Image (cartoon, grey):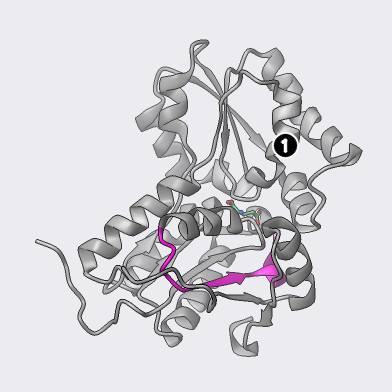
């Protein structure tokens, strides 16, 4: 029986947040899957990187940003951040039981199925890889595989600065990937939403045959299913405008990097002070 919340109109926006621009890789997938929806994206750039923060600090930000979104009347919250999902999705769901709260997790299950060598490389943040939620995922879905974990905090900051190409980015990627490939990892999992923006360089270094898995499209599909179940899916014409971008740090920098990444003009706003 679908759970319908008639107090929220289908025209209400959807809130998404990440520590910075990484979640825009999921934003793009949501735009493609649900073109009629209006999206409010918060880049929590005053607190990036989440991956090097304590679980307590990441949960505290989830609580503050959840309150911000509810004040904006959102009909769903999406957390396109593996680190924040691992640390805080349970608390967010408990705090907002009336609306869907959608998280993301690394594509360990499909990777374990695809691998022939039985060795998969997972690239993520320190926080994600150390979390009980991630450990449980590996134990459940990749019991027989050898899962090689690589924290890549430097990659997060390269993407935050908009350095998606170039020799220093290539070097940073090669430093992590080459030993993994030499150890016969034959599937790579992008367990951080920043990393799909390095896909060109990742592909150059990994070569043409290694699957590189990301999770944005699966999150967008899950969001669609949840909106349908809650009776709040917006089936109207594509929203040509009305998407908002906010930064807890410098909005000018978010406009620059998000504009570069999305290939469109982005007019970012400052997140109200009490939520920073
Ligand atoms: N993009 C985030 C993730 O998916 C977090 C990166 C960070 O702030 O360390 O894990």
Look at 70% across and 68% down and name the residue there: 45
Question: Total label count?
Answer: 1
Q: Quadrant for residue 4, please give it.
A: bottom left
Asked where in the image residue 176 lies, by quadrant, the reply is top right
Left or right of 276 in this view: 117? left
Q: Locate residue 243 relative to residue 176 in the image: left or right.
A: left
Tell me: residue 111, above or below residue 55: above
Q: Is residue 273 magenta?
A: no
Between 7 and 267, the one lying in front of the other is 267
Could you tell me residue 275's position as x and y percent? 59, 83
> What residue lies at 60% left-to-right and 21% top-to-bottom?
210
Specify the quadrant that holds the N terminus.
bottom left
Secondary element type, mark 1 = helix
For the residue pair 275 and 52, the one nearer the viewer reads as 275
Q: Position of residue 155 (x, y in %)?
A: 74, 45
Residue sitting at x 70%, y 63%: 258
Neighbor class of circle 1 (other Cα within 10 Å; few <14, some 14-19, many 20+) is: few
In screen coordinates, is 194 left or right of 130?
A: right
Identify the residue at horizontal 56%, vertical 64% (top origin): 58
x and y, in percent, of residue 177 in the image? 72, 26
Q: Which residues are magenta?
A: 34-48
Q: Which percent across, then down, holds residue 133?
A: 43, 45
Q: Is residue 101 left or right of residue 225?
A: right
In front of the other: 259 or 92? 259
Position of the C terminus by quadrant? bottom right
**Residue denoted by label 1:** 200
């Amino acid at each position: 029986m679908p759970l319908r919340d008639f107090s929220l109109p289908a025209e209400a926006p959807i809130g998404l947040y990440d520590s910075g621009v990484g979640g825009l890789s999921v934003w793009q997938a949501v735009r493609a899957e649900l073109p009629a929806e209006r999206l409010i994206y918060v880049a929590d750039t005053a607190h990036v990187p989440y991956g090097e923060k304590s679980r307590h600090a990441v949960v505290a930000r989830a609580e503050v940003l959840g309150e911000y979104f509810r004040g904006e009347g959102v009909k769903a919250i999406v957390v396109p951040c593996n680190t924040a999902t691992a640390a805080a999705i349970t608390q967010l769901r408990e705090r907002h039981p009336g609306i869907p709260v959608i998280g993301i997790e690394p594509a360990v299950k499909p990777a374990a199925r695809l691998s022939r060598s039985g060795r998969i490389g997972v690239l993520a943040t320190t926080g994600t890889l150390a979390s009980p939620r991630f450990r449980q995922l590996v134990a459940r879905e990749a019991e027989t595989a050898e899962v090689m974990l690589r924290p890549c905090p430097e990659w997060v900051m390269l993407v935050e600065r908009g350095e998606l190409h170039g020799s220093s980015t290539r070097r940073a990627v090669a430093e992590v990937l080459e030993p993994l490939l030499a150890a016969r990892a034959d599937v790579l999992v992008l367990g951080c939403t920043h990393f799909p923006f390095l896909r060109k360089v990742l592909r150059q270094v990994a070569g043409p045959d290694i699957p590189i898995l990301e999770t944005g499209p699966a999150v967008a599909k899950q969001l669609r299913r949840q909106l349908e179940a809650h009776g709040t899916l917006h089936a109207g014409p594509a929203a040509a405008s009305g998407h908002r971008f906010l930064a807890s740090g410098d909005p000018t920098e978010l406009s620059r990097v998000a504009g570069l990444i999305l290939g469109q003009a982005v007019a970012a706003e400052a997140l109200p002070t009490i939520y920073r």
